[in-house]
């Protein structure tokens, strides 16, 4: 029993604090909470949490309470150049955090800034919106998109959703009407949700002062080799940028100005931009020459039958396709066609 208990203690110790960390001993991490809003105060007894992360793995969590002057201190914290130290607190329902890597955490005090709140998103600015056509699935006629949006709060207050002005009081993003498979990620503080609204979606996340990123992906079904898009800009954009691979489609737009091509991952992208898009305005463009399904699938669609996917040896494939074609040519007309 003693040997088993000793093994368990050693295993837990090595799991939570690797040898490279324990060998460097412990230290103290201290800092202060400040209010970044003009005239704002720091309430006493705010809870402060310290999370220690090593290579994206949480290895320890500690909590304390800030003093009346906003100061806080954690004793006996493991040191390590490969450790990241994240301190956070919650104020008026919003989580604020500060992070330091390695020696930066214990060689100088950390500053954890909180802000007062302001309802609504009218003060927010979108410096850039970049829409990337990442690829297409011709068999299913699906276009895949990635959109990266920069969101900036230039004020000294945290913008929070105005639930009395829906959806205008939310941070909104436009989507094509046919969009599906939406997936959203962002760098805002935790606690927000994705809400579907007319012509797109909105976020209920608080937005403290500073610059943040929102990334989202979606798919669009297309029926022909040309698709038209009109995207609204509820908050405007300093620059709207469209990136389309040269081997995917040609871009036509009276509003977007061509820029120099860019090579990313060995693939050449056409780049078009629009500067200074105003709030409530939009951008329109067409993708021309989209890849189409193989002709057997198009033939089945023309016959009004769902595609039948059969795995066959290549030697039999030509005979099967020829048989489908002969069957189609000999197919008797439907009653409606005969009557017409």
Image (spheres, grey):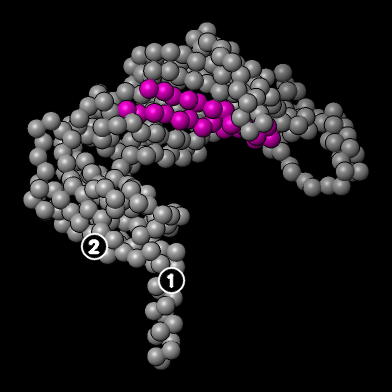
| Residue 222 placement: quadrant | top right
Give the residue drawn at x 65%, y 24%. 268
Give the residue drawn at x 19%, y 32%. 157
Q: Residues within 10 Å of mark 1 (few under 14, many from 20)?
A: some
Q: Position of residue 210 (x, y in %)?
A: 29, 31
Is 276 drawn above or below residue 164 in the view shown?
A: above
Main SS, magenta residues = strand
Residue 97 magenta-highlighted: no
Image quadrant where one finds the C terminus: top right
The residue singled out by tag 1 in the image is 14
Q: Position of residue 301 (x, y in %)?
A: 70, 31
Residue 12 at least partly seen = yes
Is 23 drawn above or below residue 160 in the view shown?
A: below
**Most foreground residue, 324 or 253:** 253
The residue singled out by tag 2 in the image is 75
Q: Earlier in the sequence, mark 2 or mark 1?
A: 1
**Most foreground residue, 130 or 36:** 36
Question: Distance between the Cα atoms at labels 2 and 1?
Answer: 20 Å
Residue range of the region highlighted in magenta in the rendering: 127-152
């Amino acid at each position: 029993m003693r040997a088993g208990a000793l093994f368990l203690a050693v295993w837990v110790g090595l799991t939570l604090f690797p040898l490279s960390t324990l060998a460097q001993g412990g230290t103290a991490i201290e800092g202060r909470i400040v209010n970044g809003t003009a005239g704002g105060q720091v309430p006493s007894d705010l809870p402060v949490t310290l999370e220690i992360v090593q290579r994206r793995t949480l290895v320890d969590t500690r909590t304390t309470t800030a003093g009346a002057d906003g100061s806080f201190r954690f004793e006996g914290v493991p040191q390590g150049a490969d450790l990241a130290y994240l301190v956070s607190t919650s104020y008026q329902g919003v989580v604020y955090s500060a992070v330091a890597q390695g020696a930066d955490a214990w060689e100088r005090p950390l500053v954890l800034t909180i802000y007062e709140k302001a309802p609504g998103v009218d003060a927010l600015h979108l410096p850039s919106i970049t829409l990337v056509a990442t690829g297409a699935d011709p068999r299913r006629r699906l276009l895949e998109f990635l959109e990266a949006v920069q969101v900036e709060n230039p004020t000294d207050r945290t913008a929070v959703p105005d639930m009395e002005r829906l959806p205008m009081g939310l941070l909104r993003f436009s989507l094509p009407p046919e969009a599906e498979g939406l997936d959203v990620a962002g760098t805002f503080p935790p606690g927000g949700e994705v809400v579907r609204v007319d012509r797109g979606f909105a976020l209920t996340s608080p937005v403290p002062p500073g610059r943040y990123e929102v990334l989202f992906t979606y798919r669009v079904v297309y029926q022909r080799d040309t698709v038209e898009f009109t995207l609204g800009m509820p908050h405007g954009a300093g620059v709207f940028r469209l990136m389309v691979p040269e081997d995917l489609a040609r871009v036509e737009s009276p509003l977007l100005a061509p820029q120099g091509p860019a090579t990313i991952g060995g693939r050449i992208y056409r780049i078009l931009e629009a500067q200074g898009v105003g709030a409530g305005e939009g951008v329109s463009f067409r993708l021309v020459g989209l890849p189409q399904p193989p002709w057997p699938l198009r033939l089945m669609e023309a016959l009004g039958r769902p595609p039948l996917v059969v795995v066959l040896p290549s030697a039999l494939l030509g005979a099967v396709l020829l048989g489908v074609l002969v069957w189609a040519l000999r197919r008797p007309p439907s009653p409606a066609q005969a009557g017409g």
